[in-house]
């Protein structure tokens, strides 16, 4: 499964960057992805509301949620949003089959 991960660092996290500006975070995140049975596809640091955007392959959303919890525990991450990549055409086909099944209250 493919996931898009949006993250914001805490002051502690940005302080770590300033203390170690040459640290290879891409290598660490790539190794971490491999340890959970996945793969880092892409990693970008950004300006704006998120500090980091990663695209990761992982076995399941449960694994990604577990990873989120473990990363948040370090205190370096303020926010970590995990979005699951979906096939909207397949979903729309299934949804089209369900049109009319739900009846609104009073109908």
Image: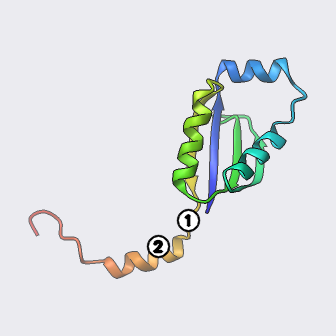
Asked if residue 104 is positioned above or below residue 66 in the image, the reply reads below
- Find the distance from the CA under tag 1 to the CA under tag 2: 8 Å
Question: What number is the disc on residue 86?
Answer: 1
| Residue 14 to residue 43: above or below | above
Report whether 86 appears left or right of 97. right
56 sits left or right of 26 in the view: left
Q: Which residue is mark 2?
A: 91
Outermost residue toward the left? 106
Q: Left or right: 75 with respect to 23?
A: left
Q: Quadrant of residue 24?
A: top right
Q: Position of residue 61 (x, y in %)?
A: 53, 54
Contact (Cβ within 8 Å) of mark 1 with mark 2 = yes
Considering depth in this image, is 53 or 35 the residue closer to the camera?
35
- The colouring scheme, among rainbow, by chain, secondary structure or one colour, is rainbow
Image coordinates of residue 1 in percent, x first then y, are 61, 63
Residue at point 70%, 34% (across, down): 51
Where disc 1 sits, the SS reads: loop
**x, y percent for residue 100:** 25, 78
Q: From the image, which quarter does the C terminus lie in?
A: bottom left
Please tell me how crowded label 1 is: few (under 14), some (14-19), or many (20+) other residues with Cα within 10 Å: few
């Amino acid at each position: 499964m493919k996931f898009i991960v949006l993250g914001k660092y805490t002051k502690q996290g940005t302080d770590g960057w300033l203390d170690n500006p040459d640290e290879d975070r891409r290598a660490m995140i790539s190794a971490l992805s491999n340890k959970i049975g996945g793969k880092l596809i892409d990693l970008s640091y950004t300006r704006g509301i998120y500090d980091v955007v990663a695209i990761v392959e992982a076995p399941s959303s449960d694994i990604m949620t577990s990873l989120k919890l473990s990363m948040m525990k370090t205190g370096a991450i303020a926010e970590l949003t995990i979005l699951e990549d979906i096939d909207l055409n397949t979903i729309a086909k299934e949804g089209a089959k369900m049109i009319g099944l739900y009846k609104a209250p009073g109908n």
